[in-house]
Image: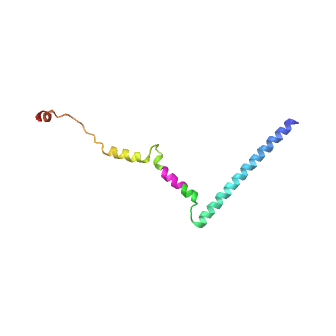
């Protein structure tokens, strides 16, 4: 008898959580549908999406794991590097003495 009650209770809890999940999914879907229709009618993007896209655009420089100014500085430093073969000229050093 207790085994039957335990199984019925598990089924009841599973059904209850399933219903709650489906209701939340339905509310979220309807909310997105209303938001989409509203933005199509008014021609404006929702403020939350505008802020989110601004944050994504601002974070593009941090994707490599470094500060954005470090990348610009590194490019400027590499632009000044010249590959030459150095050698010592002894004749000019001895002529100056």
Magenta includes 80?
A: no
Give the position of the C terminus as an image quadrant: top left
Q: How many marks?
A: 0
Magenta highlight: main SS? helix
Image quadrant in which you'd find residue 31: bottom right
Image quadrant in which you'd find residue 10: top right
Q: Is residue 33 left or right of residue 43?
A: right
Residue drawn at 55 percent across, 54 percent down: 52
Q: Is residue 88 above or below residue 30?
A: above
Give the position of the N terminus as an image quadrant: top right
Of all residues, the one furthest to the right in this rendering is: 1
Residue drawn at 51 percent across, 55 percent down: 54
Residue stretch rendered in magenta on the structure: 52-59
Residue 53 in picture, x, y percent from top left = 53, 55
Of all residues, the one furthest to the bottom in this rendering is: 42
Residue 21 in picture, x, y percent from top left = 72, 49
């Amino acid at each position: 008898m207790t085994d039957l009650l335990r199984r019925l209770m598990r089924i009841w809890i599973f059904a209850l959580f399933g219903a709650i999940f489906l209701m939340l999914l339905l509310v979220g879907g309807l909310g997105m549908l209303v938001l989409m229709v509203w933005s199509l009618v008014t021609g404006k993007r929702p403020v939350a999406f505008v802020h989110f896209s601004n944050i994504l655009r601002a974070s593009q420089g941090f994707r490599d794991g470094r500060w954005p100014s470090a990348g610009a500085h590194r490019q400027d430093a590499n632009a000044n590097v010249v590959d030459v073969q150095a050698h010592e000229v002894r004749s000019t050093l001895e002529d100056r003495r």
